[in-house]
Image (cartoon, helix red, strand yellow):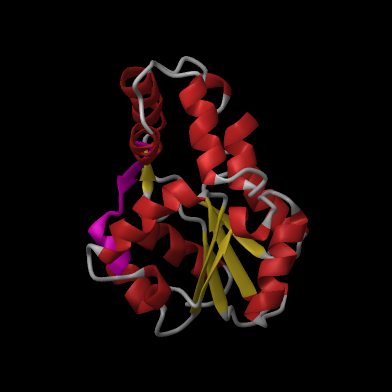
């Protein structure tokens, strides 16, 4: 979507797959090896989770209920900590250059986060940022988290709600996500949107997109 010369005021980033690298197969192995949980393939997807995992990310069940339901299908003796560690295995880390990039972008744009995520994953996400000296609450003006909002991408409603809270008009926002469905949902809600592959360089890809929108 073009901005027709209108300035981009805000950047809204997805978290997993954009800022934090993901390893889906590592997470599946952790559920199988640590918990002997055999149903994880039915729950984990590259972009949108299913079943109780989706319910957790939409805030329909609590973290404790999710842990209990996973443990019910796991080997005897497994604990809630084992469940958390298996969930954490999805989140590989943040490449250091991205912290520098976000710091530079914050000089010109308001930065926000919009993620389909859950309270267990966020324990590690907060930790990854804090350990490098860039806590999320200082890096972003606001975090829009699916389990708190009780809605998920790619629903147009979640994008409209987030943009309304930024105080911007949709055409002055750029949303960055690794899911084509989420990018399409953002565009339907009137936002500018950019599809990103985590194997690419975010700084280069974002610069190209901003140039396309006439911002550089």
**In the rendered structure, does residue 19 fall within the stretch colored magenta?**
no
Position of residue 64 relative to residue 203, above or below, is above
Residue 186 lies left or right of residue 88; in this view the side is right
Q: Which residues are magenta?
A: 89-99
Q: How many marks?
A: 0
- Can you say which quadrant of the picture contains the N terminus? bottom right
Question: Residue 116, position in %: x, y?
Answer: 57, 50
**Residue 3 is at least partly visible in this image:** no
Question: Residue 156, position in %: x, y?
Answer: 76, 56
The quarter holding residue 161 reads: bottom right
**Residue 13 is at least partly visible in this image:** yes
* Residue at the image point whose x is 47% and y is 14% from the top: 38
Question: Residue 139, position in %: x, y?
Answer: 39, 74
* Residue at the image point whose x is 57% and y is 81% from the top: 9
Residue 69 lies left or right of residue 132; in this view the side is right
Position of residue 184 relative to residue 148, above or below, is above
The quarter holding residue 203 reads: bottom left
Position of residue 119 relative to residue 133, above or below, is above
* Residue at the image point whose x is 40% and y is 33% from the top: 83
Position of residue 5 relative to residue 183, above or below, is below
The quarter holding residue 61 reads: top right
Q: Nearer the viewer, residue 188 or 141?
A: 141
Question: Residue 166, position in %: x, y?
Answer: 63, 78
* Residue at the image point whose x is 59% and y is 42% from the top: 56
Residue 158 lies left or right of residue 118; in this view the side is right
Q: Nearer the viewer, residue 59 or 109?
A: 59
């Amino acid at each position: 979507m073009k901005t027709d010369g209108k300035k981009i005021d805000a950047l809204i980033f997805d978290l997993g797959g954009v800022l934090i690298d993901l390893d889906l197969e590592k997470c599946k192995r952790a559920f199988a090896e640590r918990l002997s949980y055999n149903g994880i393939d039915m729950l984990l997807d590259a972009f949108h989770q299913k079943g109780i995992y989706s319910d957790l990310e939409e805030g329909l069940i609590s973290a404790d209920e999710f842990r209990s339901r996973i443990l019910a299908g796991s080997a005897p003796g497994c604990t809630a900590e084992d469940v958390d560690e298996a969930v954490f295995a999805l989140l590989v880390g943040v490449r250091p250059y991205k912290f520098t990039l976000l710091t530079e972008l914050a000089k010109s744009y308001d930065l926000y986060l919009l993620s389909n995520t859950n309270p267990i994953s966020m324990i590690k996400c907060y930790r990854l940022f804090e350990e490098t000296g860039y806590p999320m609450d200082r890096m972003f003006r606001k975090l829009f988290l699916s389990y708190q909002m009780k809605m998920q991408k790619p629903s147009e409603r979640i994008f409209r709600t987030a943009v309304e809270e930024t105080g911007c008009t949709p055409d002055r926002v750029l949303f960055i996500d690794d899911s084509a469905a989420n990018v399409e949902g953002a565009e339907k809600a009137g936002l500018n949107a950019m599809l990103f592959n985590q194997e690419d360089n975010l700084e280069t890809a974002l610069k190209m997109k901003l140039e396309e929108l006439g911002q550089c």
